[in-house]
Image: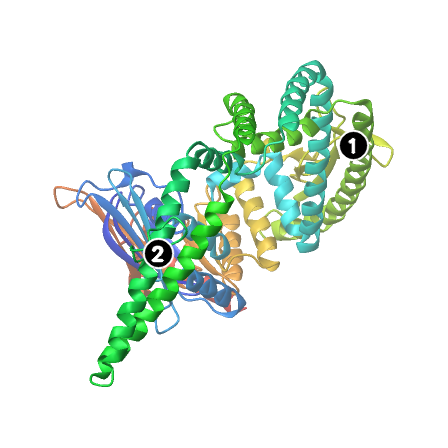
Amino acid sequence: MLEELRITGLGVIDDTTLRLTSGMNVITGETGAGKTMVVTGLGLLFGGRADAGRVRADPGRAVVEGRLKLRGTLGDAVRTRITDAGGEADDDGSILLSRTVTAEGRSRAHVGGRSMPVSTLSELGEQILAVHGQSDQLRLLRPSEQRSALDRFAGPEHEKLIDTYREAFGRWRAVVDDLADRKRNARQRSQEADLLKLGLDEITRVDPQPGEDDELRNEVQRLEHAEGLRVAAALAAQALAGGVEAADDTPDATQLLGLARRTLEGQAAVDSSLGDLAARIEEAATLAGDVASELSGYLSSLDADPARLEAIYERRAALRALTRKYADDVDGVIAWAENARTKLSELDTSDELLEELDRERQRLEAAVGELAGRLTAARREAAGRFSEAVSVELAGLAMPHSRVEVAVLTRSPSRDEPAVTVDGETLAAGADGADEVELRLHAHPGAPALPLQKGASGGELSRVMLAIEVVFAGAGGPPTLVFDEVDSGVGGTAAVEIGRRLARLARTHQVLVVTHLPQVAAFADRHLVVAKDTGGAITTSGVRIVEETERARELSRMLAGLPDSDLGIAHAEELLSVAAREKRA
């Protein structure tokens, strides 16, 4: 759970700390006091988009810090993820998170004492936190969100089926698009293929080899300077070991080294260090002999063959013709040829290939149709369970005669839409299947089933959203749930029932509720009040925990706007007493 939240320099909040409990935490306060900034701060802490306009001019940056204490499998997974990224947990196992946003819009994130990308906070947020506000209610009106809600309820096996379908759908669409492109651009592809074939034919005739241009360059230099190389090698060989052309009275290096060695050896008995030097001279003589032998072999290999030189000139001219057209060097020409062969296979518009692609398209289309049918059947089965579960929750939210219906619909394709055959029927298919999901509300017995956007008022939509979240909570999900004024437009008995449901959620989850309803606030395990201070030159807000008498006064303010009214306080105390009994039940 989130144990602590500190917000500095965000909106009207200068510096405040929220100490949270594991149950139901309620946040109340006057309109404009800064309750929304608490939710905004939570969003920032878990990777939400940074808005520099909300940063206070002084100190010029907003900082949101949080302390997480996680247990169980989720806690182990989160700690492992953070450790792998270089962060560390505190000694008590808690994890510190931090997000900083400057007035210039720069943003930084820290997790476990280590600077990390903001995306790491987002990744953690998906596992830890679910935020529900009025914008979420509006999002729930979209068909794609309603389909996602049903898929989430259906469970992990259903999600695996969706992944399998999406993979098959992607491969099918790739083949369809490839086939259509080859047919549509057959002439252009044929012209491009002809040009590539001409280039490949020219390169194949020359048949360049890797590194050949460098090898030929070195060889031509040797041939062009063969006489100079021969003279240099011959002179060096004579100097080292003599030879037929050496003068009889001219000692070579080998003879001189031999003389030096013998001279030193003659005196080694007197001074042993001269023996060591003599041994080293012997090594030098051996090395000089080896070099002389190699020079002899080099001289025999030198060839001033004019015919070979002419052949190299012609070969280099052929290679230069290729490098002028296709690349900077021979290796680049070879790479161009390899790419051209690959491109030719992509440009192929032969009847044989088109027929093969069409067979693959038909095979994949049949597979997508079969998976789409299984997906539709699975959604319809889940729709019945989902409708029943949400309707039961609505009955407990003062909508006893209302019922939610989940319709799983199929569409006939338009001209340009992809289509598959599902159980003998041609249907429009997308990346999520061949279905559209629509949540409908029966407001009362005998009323027609209308889509949520047409059949639900603001208060009803809030309760439907809460009912769906209660159903989701029973199937797992993030351990911390945040509700930002989802009770808007609700009052009376419905407000009490919302408070009761939120309290029930708080038995298994940490729940944070921003509310304006005293009936909801009465169910809190911890009540925090955002208070605005206008005494100074700049308006600021802070958050404090209220208990006992202070809490009754806050509920009285929420009830009648009169925190010191004896009647209001009595009513507030009655609300608290009722809520306490309900929570114990």
Camera-side residue of 126 and 211: 211
Q: Is residue 92 above or below residue 188?
A: below
Q: Position of residue 552 (x, y in %)?
A: 33, 59
Q: Residue at 29%, 72% (x, y): give it.
A: 261
- In the figure, is residue 6 to the left or right of 510? left
Instruction: Determine which of the numbered discs, if any, sits on residue 240 in the image.
Output: 2
Q: Position of residue 2 (x, y in %)?
A: 40, 61
Circle 2 crowding by C-alpha within 10 Å: few under 14, some 14–19, many from 20: many
Instruction: Determine which of the numbered discs, if any, sits on residue 489 in the image.
Output: none
- In the figure, is residue 85 to the left or right of 179? left
Q: Secondary structure at mark 1?
A: helix
Residue 58 picture quarter = top left
**Quadrant of the frame with the C terminus:** bottom right
Residue 25 picture quarter = bottom left
Camera-side residue of 68 and 541: 68
Q: Secondary structure at mark 2?
A: helix
Q: Position of residue 13 (x, y in %)?
A: 25, 48
Any part of residue 482 in sight = no
Q: Residue at 50%, 46% (x, y): give it.
A: 300
Residue under pointer 1: 361
Residue 181 picture quarter = top right
